[in-house]
Image: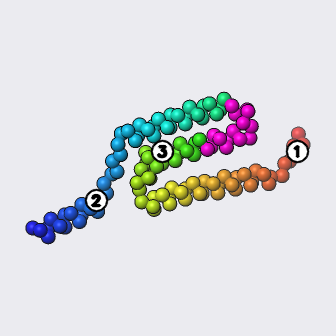
Amino acid sequence: MAAHSHSNEHNEANVLHPHISPTSMYLKVAGALFGLTILTVVAHQFHHAMGAFAPIVAFGIAAVKATLVLLYFMHLKDDNNMNRVIFASGFFFLIVLLFFSVVDLVTRVHEISPL
């Protein structure tokens, strides 16, 4: 019986257990997300004053919000490194896509329509 009990303990350790977080943590993160959403609206009101920095501010706020969602609501904070690498590679390839899109737009020859 003792060997069987030890075997069950070993199997239970290999079972994937969901990470349980306190409700207060979710409420704090949700509050931060609501606050950042309000900040996004306020920043939009001043987008003319910010000029070229307006998109940078908007993307910065969005990046912080996405990071909070990924870390806390998708539990990447408590996940293994392989899942973090997979998520990071997705963002890396998004940046590569945007980079080549910008290069394509900047290097186009502007044609004047004969019409």
Q: Position of residue 46 (x, y in %)?
A: 69, 31
Q: Position of residue 61 (x, y in %)?
A: 59, 41
The quarter of the picture where the C terminus appears is: top right
Label 1 crowd (10 A; few <14 / some 14-19 / many >=20): few
* First in residue order: circle 3 vs circle 1: 3
Q: Residue furthest bottom?
A: 3
Nearer the viewer's eye, disc 2 or disc 1?
Answer: 2
Instruction: Please name the predominant secondary structure of the magenta segment in the image.
Output: helix
Q: Is residue 101 left or right of residue 61?
A: right
* First in residue order: circle 3 vs circle 2: 2
For the residues labelled 3 and 2, say whether their Cβ atoms are less than 8 Å apart: no
* In the depicted structure, whether residue 104 falls above or below residue 60: below
The quarter of the picture where the N terminus appears is: bottom left
* In the depicted structure, whether residue 35 falls above or below residue 107: above
What label sits on residue 15 in the rendered view? Answer: 2
Q: Amino acid at mark 3?
A: Val
Q: Amino acid at mark 2?
A: Val
Which residue does the image show at 44% across and 52% down from the upper left? 77
Q: Is residue 18 left or right of residue 47?
A: left
Q: Amino acid at mark 1?
A: Ile
For the residues labelled 3 and 1, say whether their Cβ atoms are less than 8 Å apart: no
Residue at the spot of label 1: 112
| Element at label 2 | loop
Q: Position of residue 80 (x, y in %)?
A: 42, 60
Residue range highlighted in magenta: 46-60
Nearer the viewer's eye, disc 3 or disc 1?
Answer: 3
How far apart are labels 3 and 2 at the CA level? Answer: 25 Å
For the residues labelled 2 and 1, say whether their Cβ atoms are less than 8 Å apart: no
Which residue does the image show at 52% across and 34% down from the upper left? 35
Residue at the spot of label 3: 69
